[in-house]
Image (cartoon, helix red, strand yellow):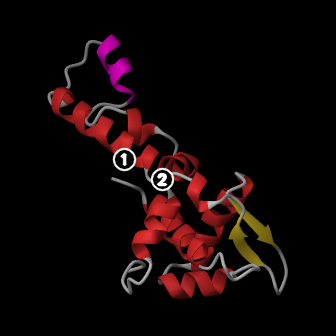
Amino acid sequence: MLSSSSRYAIRALLYLAGREQEKGSTGIREISSALGLPAPFLAKILQQLAKNKILSSVKGPNGGFSMQRKPESLTLYEIVKIIDGDDVFKNCLIHDGSCSEVKRSKKVCTVHEEYSVIRREINTLFRNTTLAKLAGRAAGSDNIFI
């Protein structure tokens, strides 16, 4: 359902949120190594989050990333919207475009009734789930980053 980019962003943000007590920046090599993710790809994702003021970015040999937004105020919806846009929350499952566009074009979506219920639930879940909530669940778990 989510792109690799969104999944990597969430995992990296969880990692950084877990290190929030340790002041300072965390380098891309450390993050990518800890999460087992490709550093160049992850760096682009984290730069996108920094551009949108989710993370702070410091360049240079002692640089890295740190949380700019508080995990309590950052939802999964916001993260996914920054990385992938909001298509996953509004688009038809089998046609191109949003469900309202599909209805206007009079195309038949054979799963609309069932999927619209699921999409509403996903939307609610992502809008109500904060990074802090996920970080709290991850505390003490060894396999959150796998």
Marks 1 and 2: in contact by CB < 8 Å?
yes
**Earlier-in-chain disc, 2 versus 1:** 2
Q: Residue furthest right?
A: 60
The main secondary structure of the magenta stretch is helix
Q: In the rendered view, does 8 fall on the left or right side of 108?
A: right
35 vs 43, left or right, is: left
Stretch in magenta: 97-104
Q: Foreground residue, 132 or 41?
A: 132
* Residue 111, x across and y down, in percent: 16, 31
Q: Quadrant of residue 45?
A: bottom right
Question: Which residue carries the number 1 mark?
Answer: 125
What number of labels is visible?
A: 2
Residue type (three-letter) at the residue carrying disc 1: Leu
Q: Quadrant of the C terminus?
A: bottom left
Instruction: State left or right for residue 93 relative to residue 76.
Output: left
Q: Is residue 99 left or right of residue 56?
A: left
Q: Which residue is mark 2?
A: 76
Which residue: 52% across, 87% down? Answer: 34
Q: Rate crowding at label 1 as few (under 14), some (14 to 19) or many (20 or more) other CA atoms within 10 Å.
A: some
Compared to residue 58, the image places residue 126 above or below, namely above
Queried whether the magenta region covers residue 142, the answer comes back as: no
Residue 86, disc: none
